[in-house]
Image: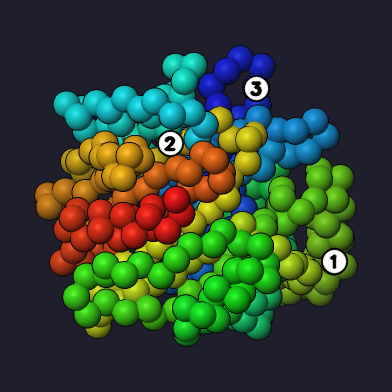
Amino acid sequence: MRELQDRTQKQSLKYTDLQDRGFKNMDKLTEPENVLKIQAFDVSDKVMEQVYQKATPKKGNIGKIHFQPRITVPIMILLFVVGASVTGYAASQYLEFRNSKGDVVLNTAKTPAETDASKTYTSTYARWNEEVKNRLQPGEYAAYYVKDDSMNQNNLSNLALFAYKPAELSSFNSLQDEIKRTEAPLFSNPTHLPDGYQFEFGYVYPIAAYPGMMDKKEYRALTDKLMQQAKAAPKGENLFIQKLNWDKSDSSFARYARGNDYVNITVTKYTPEVTKTTIMQNEQDSAEQLTIKGTKAYYIRASEASRPLEAGKNRLGWIDEKRHLHYNISDNQDSPLTKDDLVKIAEDLLNASS
């Protein structure tokens, strides 16, 4: 799931973007060294990725971060970088992407090990988030507060969480109509899909209420409202939900499937506040820099010797700096696809965007 900057006197906001159950939920901000492996983007139930992001907040607002994805998101997710020149370090199988000033704006890094605390949080969060989504209709987005100490002790600055239940669209034309209606990132239907893969469903994801749609004051007011409801509620009532209105999106997602295998395309807008993004990978995974149609891209292949991240076996992504978009292509963990299959899809997308 998108997110999760290293200049002095700049505040850093980071998040983990996993997608084994979904796509995008701005719910957990934490330092990388203490990061909990949590589900951050809620949408599809099958796709995940880990991303850290560093952002410079605007004055008076919480700095906006994404990917989504999710991430990957089918998150998203979700790299947001600035600049053009890229340097890769194949020997260590980690990459660094630099801008014209020489600043590292994108890199890949080893996924943090799970701890007992992170496992507990992941399990608790997933249970409550699923409960919220069960109470929503497709297309509804909500803030919620859980009266649960095992969660809140890890969310002291972000007690109000968010959940979105996607409205899955079964035709690409319907998806394009929704993309245009919500001003989500537009992309074309790829023509060079692997044999037998067809469009299965797609959706857009609303611009995150926190921090995209409200500043600190609004977020605190929303949090206070939910917590007051919790205090006044009878014993045994632990979940408090506030549905949110939305009409703008910053992420588009499409899945193409053949039987149980699939490939996901996520396109996410990013903002100038994001100055560095870190994509997480297993230590045994290989990371490779590619040039596709003149565009620098990253490719990560899960190692046969280790369980792949929930993002899937293959990941390929790049930045469109002019349009401030991040493209990410990923598949399932047991995918039969190869790097060349993802490259052909990327070529279609790049041809259309140019």
Give the alpha-carbon distance from disc 1 to disc 2, as whole Å. 38 Å
Left or right: residue 143 compared with residue 13? right
Q: Is residue 288 above or below residue 121?
A: above
Q: Tell me residue 16's x, y (percent).
A: 48, 46
Three-letter amino acid code of the residue under disc 3: Lys
The residue pinned by badge 3 equals 10
Q: Mark 1, mark 2: which one is toward the viewer?
A: 2
Residues at marks 1 and 2 touching, judged by CB atoms closer than 8 Å: no
> Which element type, helix, strand or loop, lies under badge 3?
loop
Q: Nearer the viewer, residue 350 or 334?
A: 350
> Which element type, helix, strand or loop, lies under badge 2?
strand
Name the residue rendered at 73%, 39% in the picture: 62
The residue pinned by badge 1 equals 229
Query: Within the image, what quadrant is residue 11 found in?
Result: top right
Give the alpha-carbon distance from disc 1 to disc 3, as whole Å. 36 Å
Name the residue rendered at 64%, 77% in the picture: 139
Q: Residues within 10 Å of mark 3 (few under 14, many from 20)?
A: few
Name the residue rendered at 27%, 32% in the picture: 94
Q: Residues within 10 Å of mark 2 (few under 14, many from 20)?
A: many
Q: Mark 1, mark 3: which one is toward the viewer?
A: 3
Q: Tell me residue 283's x, y (percent).
A: 23, 38
The residue pinned by badge 2 equals 278
Q: Is residue 29 visible?
A: yes
